[in-house]
Image (cartoon, grey):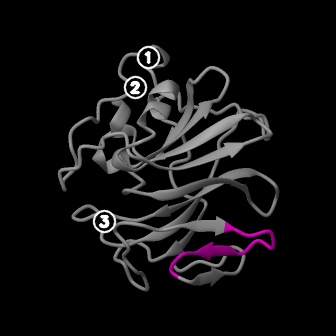
Amino acid sequence: GKHANRNTLLLTKKNFKEGEFSFTQPGKTGEKDWLHINHVCYDVEFDQIMLSVNSFSEVIIVDRLNGKIIYRWGNPFVYKRGTQDDRQLFCQHSATFCKDSHGNRTFIVFNNGRLPDRAWTSVDEIHLPEIEEKTGNYIIDSQKKQYGPAKHSWRYGGSTGRANSWYDDHIGHCQRLNNGNTLITQVFLVEPYKHIS
């Protein structure tokens, strides 16, 4: 789009190690925008930028000073460290830094879903696996070479099987409010840590 050069300034070839991206084919609907970033969030305290890369079904955190990827979550298949079975995100939107009720760093994301892989939507909270809490330095699993955690720490929406769920395949937004509730663009207001299992 009009601001595509902003992405290339941050995500240049020199900032990537070999094999960091392998997922460059067009999507099932034929989109050419392979680096579709639909949400950007800045963490002032740690000087980090979170990118929601929709076409990769992945959330990436970049160190603002050097432009390097320091954390990624949602689809390790993208960077050759997993299979489609390891995928957690499906064309997500609105990835945003926040904190859980204990003050631990997390992020929330509107996990759209996408046919045929996942025909249901959820809002997920993911605990950021720091080497030491509140440092902004992230752990990578030494065996799988994937960033954790293995799954979400909180979810609003149906579980596998889609009971009590909804499906919003294109757009969505979620926001953690100051009182701990989560605002979802589907006009849901969720009290702290309530979920549907």
Percent position (x, y) of residue 132?
A: 77, 35
The three-letter code of the residue at mark 1 reads Lys
Q: Is residue 42 visible?
A: yes
Q: Is residue 10 left or right of residue 162?
A: right
Percent position (x, y) of residue 73?
A: 49, 43
The residue closer to the viewer here, 127 or 72, is 72
The relative height of residue 197 versus residue 66 in the rendered view (above or below) is below
Residue at x 30% of width, y 63% of height? 114
The residue closer to the viewer here, 136 or 9, is 9
List the single residue furthest toward the front. 2
Residue at x 42% of width, y 55% of height? 89
- The residue indicated by pointer 3 is 118
Q: Residue 20's mark?
A: 2
Badge 3 density bin: few <14, some 14–19, many ≥20, Cα 10 Å: some
Which element carries disc 3, helix, strand or loop?
A: loop
List the single residue furthest toward the top. 14
Q: Estimate the spatial distance between the alpha carbons at disc 1 and disc 3, rounded to whole Å.
A: 31 Å
Q: Quadrant of residue 69?
A: top right
**Residue 109 falls inside the magenta stretch:** no
Assess whether mark 2 and mark 3 are in contact (beta carbons under 8 angstroms).
Answer: no
The residue closer to the viewer here, 168 or 163, is 168
Earlier residue among tags 1 and 3: 1
Earlier residue among tags 3 and 2: 2
Q: Residue 17's mark?
A: 1
Magenta region, residue range: 176-186
The three-letter code of the residue at mark 2 reads Glu
Which element carries disc 1, helix, strand or loop?
A: loop
Q: Residue 83's mark?
A: none
